[in-house]
Image (tube, rainbow, N blue to C red):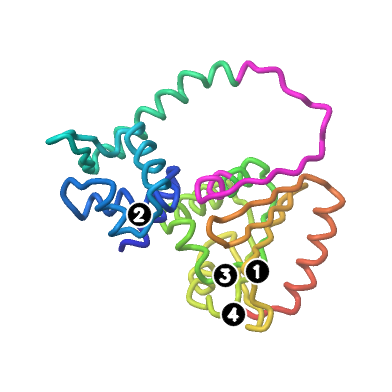
Amino acid sequence: MESRIEETLASIGFTKNEQKLYLDLMHHKKSTALEIAKRTKIHRTNIYDGLRTLLSKGFIEELIEENKRFFSARKPDALVDYLTQKKQEVEEILPLLKNMPQNTTTEESVNLSKGNFSLRETILSLLDIGCPISIYGAPKEAPQRLGIGFLESFHKQRIKRKILMRHIYNENARERIAHLNSMPYTEARFLPKKYGSIVTTAICGEMVTFIIFTDPISIISIKNRKIADAYNNYFEILWSNSYS
């Protein structure tokens, strides 16, 4: 259960150290920085950096008692309050962003991003392209890293738009493959174990996306028709040699 909490905290911007500090304070009563450092094994300098960030976002509070500084976690509802505030701030600038002049001269692009939130946004953006989606090299843990709830919502939207999606998973994901093959506009197969990889490649229209399942997740997106065509051809070779 704690791993799911950590993944969710990471998706809303918590660093590894901030996750440890926040969860430590959730488990314990008010504590000094020294007490937190002893429990978490985080260096004192990083302790104060993390505490300052958590204070600024309203996830923890600082108390002064008998000339000592103590820190304690606020109620978990503070997470929802923070996201609600950020949502309001984004909605306020949306009209400004939509009215910004667009550079339409560059048709090709390369983008690098990190983290679960960026990955989800990248996956959702494939739906706007509206072309069939081909994915290979998907590891067994991909659904857990993305979030089962998110994937269910994604597939629901995709199927509604009648967008075909083909997956080639690593061999140890047969249960997931069976589930995907039960969906409309969806096909899934696997390759033998020796071809397993932590890098997933997704091709959709002119877009090729590489998802590296490290910690944090890294995403490289390339918009280039010739590159996309080359990877589509490679996918078809893999598809014809994969197993259902």
Question: Which residue bears the numbered disc 3?
Answer: 139
Residue located 41% across and 29% down the image: 87
* Residue at the limit of the structure toward the left, as seen here: 66
Q: Position of residue 46 (x, y in %)?
A: 42, 47
**Residue 171 badge:** 4
Q: Position of residue 236 (x, y in %)?
A: 78, 68
For the N terminus, the quadrant is: bottom left
Nearer to me, 201 or 112 = 112
Residue 5's quadrant in the figure?
Answer: bottom left
Q: Amino acid at mark 3?
A: Pro
Disc 2 from disc 1: Cα separation:
31 Å
Magenta residues, start to end: 98-121
Q: Mark 1 Cα within 10 Å, few/some/many (few <14, many 20+)?
A: many
Q: Amino acid at mark 1?
A: Gly
Nearer to me, 82 or 64 = 64
Disc 2 from disc 4: Cα separation:
34 Å
**Residue 20 badge:** 2
Q: Inspect the magenta stretch and tell me whether residue 114 lies in it.
A: yes
Q: Nearer the viewer, mark 2 or mark 1?
A: 2
